[in-house]
Image: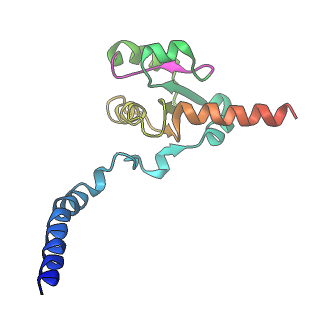
Amino acid sequence: MVKSLLVRQVLILAALGLVPGIGQAIYFRDKVSWRSPVPASEMVTVTQARAWGENAIWVDARPDSEFARDHVPGALPLNEDRWSELLPQFLAAWSQEKKVVVYCSSQSCNASREVARRLRNEAQLKNVFVLEGGWEEWLRTNRRNLKWLNR
């Protein structure tokens, strides 16, 4: 009898301990950090973006120090910290027929999503895409291509 009472109390406490977590999961289900808030139609892979060739303009949304260290060849810097300063430079290089590919450090980085959103909403640009996997995926893809070419 005492054993079953103890088991029942432990189960009740465990269930009560799960209630806040379940509540948070339900309330924040659309705000999970690892899920991209960008619709799939606004995402692009490295292979797709590279296939656009000269019809793509690459935008690096990472901090200036990371851009200075290395970036996609031909990419333009456009980050949140210097938005007002860098936007005119970007717009001078942009043309309506070009597709814009925005990237930041990795898939979990939000800078590319925010810069892409601002380009769509504030600058009223169409054909703005976020690079899946960001700079890390660009590096991985290029390493694979170099290994394949060096065979």
Q: Position of residue 147 (x, y in %)?
A: 79, 34
- Pick out the residue farthest to the bottom: 1
> Can residue 97 be seen in the rendering of this structure?
no
Which residue corresponds to the image point at 33% horizontal and 18% vertical from the top-left? 81
In this picture the colour scheme is rainbow
Which residue corresponds to the image point at 40% horizontal and 47% vertical from the top-left? 36
Q: Position of residue 126 (x, y in %)?
A: 45, 38
Magenta region: 73-81
Which residue corresponds to the image point at 18% horizontal and 61% vertical from the top-left? 23
Q: Residue 20 lies in what quarter of the image? A: bottom left
> Is residue 75 found inside the magenta-colored segment of the image?
yes
In the depicted view, which residue is nearer to us: 113 or 28? 28
Which residue corresponds to the image point at 56% horizontal and 27% vertical from the top-left? 57
In the depicted view, which residue is nearer to us: 88 or 81? 81
Establish if 84 lies above or below 46. Answer: above
Q: Position of residue 42 (x, y in %)?
A: 47, 45
> Is residue 22 found inside the magenta-colored segment of the image?
no
Q: Position of residue 125 (x, y in %)?
A: 42, 33
Q: Residue 1 lies in what quarter of the image? A: bottom left
In the depicted view, which residue is nearer to us: 14 or 44? 14
- Pick out the residue farthest to the front: 2
